[in-house]
């Protein structure tokens, strides 16, 4: 199965949208999942991670299992949610989900719900906490949940320290990206240490045998090649609908840049996604030749608002004058009837 961004087409049913702008913890009005949908804890491709340190945020593969080098970070956006189905069928990928997305995808290996009220603002007629108790996979929240057997406290302090104190998290997606990058960093560092130890061993053996030492590898180039063996896919995530999501988009793109440009991790972003996209290359491509531009429409709208405000002022003045005339008319009527006013 290809993992390139150019070969992401999947002729599968696209689930209906599940996010509602303004609702921070999944949708409150969400279509029921189709029969057969939903995370299967016993899925044949599950990574079966276990919690090693719930408070320290440490999880691990079963003894003897090879750690997967690809991670799919998954959300609700309908435009690209179809890709989750494709990569959930790829045994090379860990599947990371969030909130109540488990109602719509077939498998998951880690779960994230980074909200104060994570078990309160949920889809009607669902029991999110009960799902967490029985999901059987690492379940990350901001604090350890004693009644959730696989509860994991998100290691915020460790993550921030790893990135030199960077504190830039405007949604759950950056938390997921940062953790994925940190774990890939640790894996690459361990492999580099092994390569260095092997080289030192070669040099020592060469010295003992009285032969020329082998040439030192280009460790910088080697590091880049090791990072390129890892992939992060971002599926079902656009962050463009509504003001709440739009201000979260630059943060997610910052972490995507840290992975792709900063390290050389392979990023899989569907062509339909709004992430890391530009309308045109500034300076090289002309502005759109469409008849109306957004700025022109907004300028016209501003003029209409000004005209409306002026009309409202006149209306309020007329309303005041009418009320004054009504009061004088009442006074005159009362005097005509003999009242002393």
Image (spheres, rainbow, N blue to C red):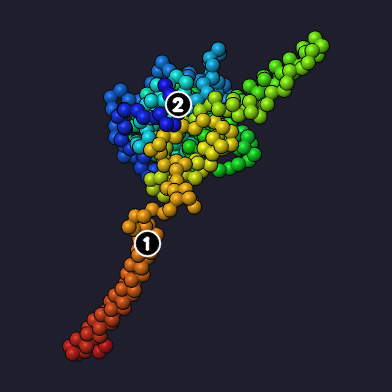
Name the spot of residue 167 as percent of width and height, x first.
58, 42
61 left or right, relative to 40? right
236 left or right, relative to 190? left
The residue lying at 37 percent from left, 33 percent from top is: 81
Q: For mark 2, what is the residue?
A: 3
Answer with mark 1 or mark 2, whichever residue precedes in sequence: 2
- Quadrant of the image occupied by residue 199: top right
SS under mark 1: helix
In depth, the one of 47 and 121 nearer the eye is 47
Residue extending furthest left?
Answer: 337
In depth, the one of 101 and 289 nearer the eye is 289
332 left or right, relative to 299? left
Question: How packed is label 2: few (under 14 Cα within 10 Å), some, or many (20 or more)?
Answer: some
Q: For mark 1, what is the residue?
A: 296
SS under mark 2: loop
* In the image, residue 214 above or below residue 307: above
- In the image, which disc is placed on residue 151? none
Name the spot of residue 245 as percent of width and height, x first.
43, 45
The residue lying at 55 percent from left, 27 percent from top is: 228
* In the image, residue 6 above or below residue 43: below
Q: Is residue 247 visible?
A: no
């Amino acid at each position: 199965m290809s993992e390139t961004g150019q070969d992401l087409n999947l002729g599968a049913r696209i689930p209906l949208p599940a996010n509602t702008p303004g609702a921070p913890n999944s949708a409150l009005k969400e279509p029921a999942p189709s029969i057969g949908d939903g995370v299967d804890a016993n899925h044949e491709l599950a990574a079966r991670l276990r919690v090693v340190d719930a408070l320290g945020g440490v999880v691990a593969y079963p003894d003897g299992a090879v750690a997967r080098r690809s991670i799919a970070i998954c959300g609700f956006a309908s435009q690209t949610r179809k890709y989750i189905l494709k990569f959930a069928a790829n045994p090379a990928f860990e599947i990371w989900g969030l909130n109540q997305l488990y109602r719509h995808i077939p498998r998951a290996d880690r779960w994230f719900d980074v909200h104060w009220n994570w078990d309160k603002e949920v889809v009607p007629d669902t029991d999110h906490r009960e799902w967490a108790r029985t999901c059987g996979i690492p379940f990350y929240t901001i604090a350890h949940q004693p009644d959730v057997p696989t509860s994991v406290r998100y290691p915020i302090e460790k993550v921030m320290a790893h990135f030199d104190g960077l504190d830039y998290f405007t949604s759950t997606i950056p938390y997921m990206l940062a953790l994925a990058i940190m774990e890939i960093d640790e894996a690459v560092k361990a492999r580099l240490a092994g390569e260095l130890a092997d080289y030192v061993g070669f040099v020592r053996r060469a010295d003992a045998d009285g032969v020329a030492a082998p040439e030192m590898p280009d460790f910088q180039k080697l590091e880049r090649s090791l990072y390129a063996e890892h992939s992060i896919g971002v599926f079902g995530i656009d962050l463009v609908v509504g003001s709440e999501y739009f201000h979260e988009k630059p943060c997610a793109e910052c972490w995507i840049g840290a992975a792709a440009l900063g390290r050389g991790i392979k990023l899989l972003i569907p062509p339909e996604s709004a992430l890391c996209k530009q309308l045109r290359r500034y300076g090289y491509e002309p502005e759109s030749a469409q008849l109306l531009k957004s700025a022109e429409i907004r300028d016209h709208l501003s003029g209409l608002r000004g005209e409306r405000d002026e009309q409202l002022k006149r209306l309020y003045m007329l309303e005041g004058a009418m009320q004054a005339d009504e009061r004088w008319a009442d006074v005159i009527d009362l005097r005509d009837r003999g009242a002393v006013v």
